[in-house]
Amino acid sequence: MGILQEDRLVPDSIDKYTRHAHYLEQYYNGQAKKIDKYLNKIAKDLRLELTKTQSVKSQARITKLLNFTEALVLEQLAAFTSGLNEQVPLFADSEVDFAANTLDLEVDGDFESVIPAPAQVLGAVNARPFNNRLLKDYLTGFSKEQAKAVREAVSTGFYEGQTTQEILRGIVGTKSQGFKNGVLNVTRTSAERMVRTALNHTSNVAKSKFFEDNIAIVPYYEWVATLDSRTSPVCRSRDGKVWKVGKGPLPPAHYNCRSATVPLLKDQVNKDGTRKLIGGKRASVDGQVSADLNYNDWLKGQSESFQIDVLGKAKADLFRKGGLSMDKFVNNTGQTLTLDQLRSKYPTAWANANN
């Protein structure tokens, strides 16, 4: 086994994983844009079918149109998710390769990381649930939910007495609004969220499988969230937290989650389970900051107005005046605590925040 370059492994890894996150963002965007082809097909075929119904509005004809609409959307979105699913094993393997190359470059000597078999990686990706759903159920559920939503929009239009052109505008949107005011734009947004969530899951499970197979070298991992105002309460609370490989939560913590994981060596973790100070830099909404800052400490350095923008006035006071850290705003499962729950659980902090 080679010698671990402990004074530079983690800072370099964080930097590489940060830059890799930018690549992933571009990859996610590219995959999400593929939905446009299928939405255009839906709009085109639905326009033709609505034209046929323009002069014949019997209940039977409307029912036929609604069935056609649901089947059309389901078919096109199933094709979209099928294409995404075909990318999953390739993407998972590329994430393992990235993790392996990053580790191998940081180790001197004859060390070579263990590469899990592609079938094992894909099996882990498909078997580990996220948000209480398996990947295949998530993809299937997306298609069914969106098909039902478009069908209901068409149905509502007919029963409200709208013309076929009004119904079509409600589905597709209007050119003056950039087609962002139609039901299909909701489907587009949902597709983007679905792609990001599914691929975030794939990325983190694939890398976790690699960590597990190299646990003698990488026994820990750190949760890394995004330092900006859009980060969710659960991800804010987990940023910088360290877990033993295979023992803790993995992103995505929620739909559209942007968090990731970074491997840690045994000697880079304190006895209390926190990461040692390592130096280096990490990205934030206002530029590069110390890699030793977690979300909690980073937010402390922001203005009062920014803290209010992130937390809301009452919780910002609890954070700033009451001394509550980010992990106190969620429970053990990552659910956000209400103000009433916070007042009951932390009466001293509540009193200090409201003085």
Image (tube, rainbow, N blue to C red):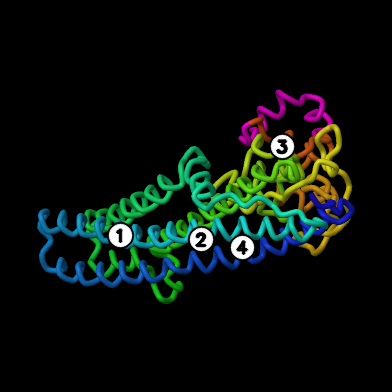
Q: Viewer-nearest of labels 1 and 3?
A: 3
Instruction: Say whether residue 193 is magenta.
Output: no
Q: How crowded is mark 3: few (under 14 residues within 10 Å), some or many (20 or more)?
A: some
- Identify which residue, 161 or 298, lies in the foreground: 298
Q: Name the residue under label 2.
A: 90
Q: Are marks 3 and 4 in contact (CB under 8 Å)?
A: no
In space, the residues marked 3 and 2 are separated at their CA atoms by 27 Å
Dot 3 falls on a residue whose secondary structure is strand
Residue 215: give x, y in percent of width and height.
70, 42
Residue at 66% from the left image edge and 28% from the top image edge: 340
In space, the residues marked 3 and 4 are separated at their CA atoms by 25 Å
Magenta region, main secondary structure: helix
Q: Viewer-nearest of labels 2 and 4?
A: 2
Residue 117: give x, y in percent of width and height.
54, 51
Label 2 or label 4, whichever comes before in sequence order: 4
- Identify which residue, 298 or 241, lies in the foreground: 241
**Which picture quadrant has residue 339?**
top right
Residue 95 relative to residue 139: left or right: right
Q: Mark 4 points at which residue?
A: 24
